[in-house]
Amino acid sequence: MILIQVIYTAFSIFPSLVVYMILLYGSIQDLVIVAGLRIAYALMACLYSSYFANPFYIYVCASERFRRQLFHVISKGCLKRLQRRVDIIYPVVVSS
């Protein structure tokens, strides 16, 4: 699992760093190239954001115990929400 995390880190963080460094320190005068690099940086920022959700998906795919615990927590939480509390409503008698 750690090896998968390291590989995903390399593919998600390093490209955005490279594009950011090119934009920051590169002296590119062509506006079309700069616009393309900014679009690439925006896409890399989305990929960077997915980096923080990655461990959850790795554990779901690789760990049987994690899947069982996840199913237990989700089913327990959903069952509590789906249970309806039956409140008895007593009618109020108004005396005149």
Image (cartoon, rainbow, N blue to C red):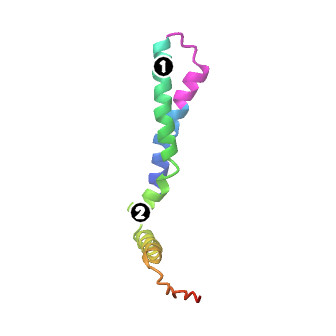
Query: Is residue 67 positioned above or below 13 on the image?
Result: below
What residue is shown at x 41% (from left), y 69% (from top)? 67
| Other residues around mark 1 within 10 Å, as few (<14) / some (14–19) / many (≥20) | few
Report how many numbered discs are placed on residues in the image: 2
Residue, disc 2 = 60
| Other residues around mark 2 within 10 Å, as few (<14) / some (14–19) / many (≥20) | some
Residue lying at the far top in this picture: please name it: 29
Instruction: Determine the secondary structure under disc 1.
Output: helix
What residue is shown at x 47% (from left), y 40% (from top)? 47
Query: Is residue 16 positioned above or below 7 on the image?
Result: above
Question: Which residue occupies the foreground of this view, 85 or 92?
Answer: 92
Q: Nearer the viewer, mark 2 or mark 1?
A: 1
The boundaries of the magenta stretch are 18-30
Residue lying at the far right in this picture: please name it: 25
Query: Per the image, is 20 magenta?
Result: yes
Cα separation, mark 2 vs mark 1, equals 38 Å
Quadrant (top left, top right, bottom left, bottom right) of the N terminus: bottom left
Instruction: Determine the secondary structure under disc 2.
Output: helix
Q: Amino acid at mark 1?
A: Ala
Question: Which residue occupies the foreground of this view, 9 or 56?
Answer: 56
Q: Amino acid at mark 2?
A: Val
Note whether residue 2 is visible.
no
Question: Residue 83: percent from the left, percent from the top?
Answer: 44, 79
What residue is shown at x 44% (from left), y 53% (from top)? 4
Residue, disc 1 = 35
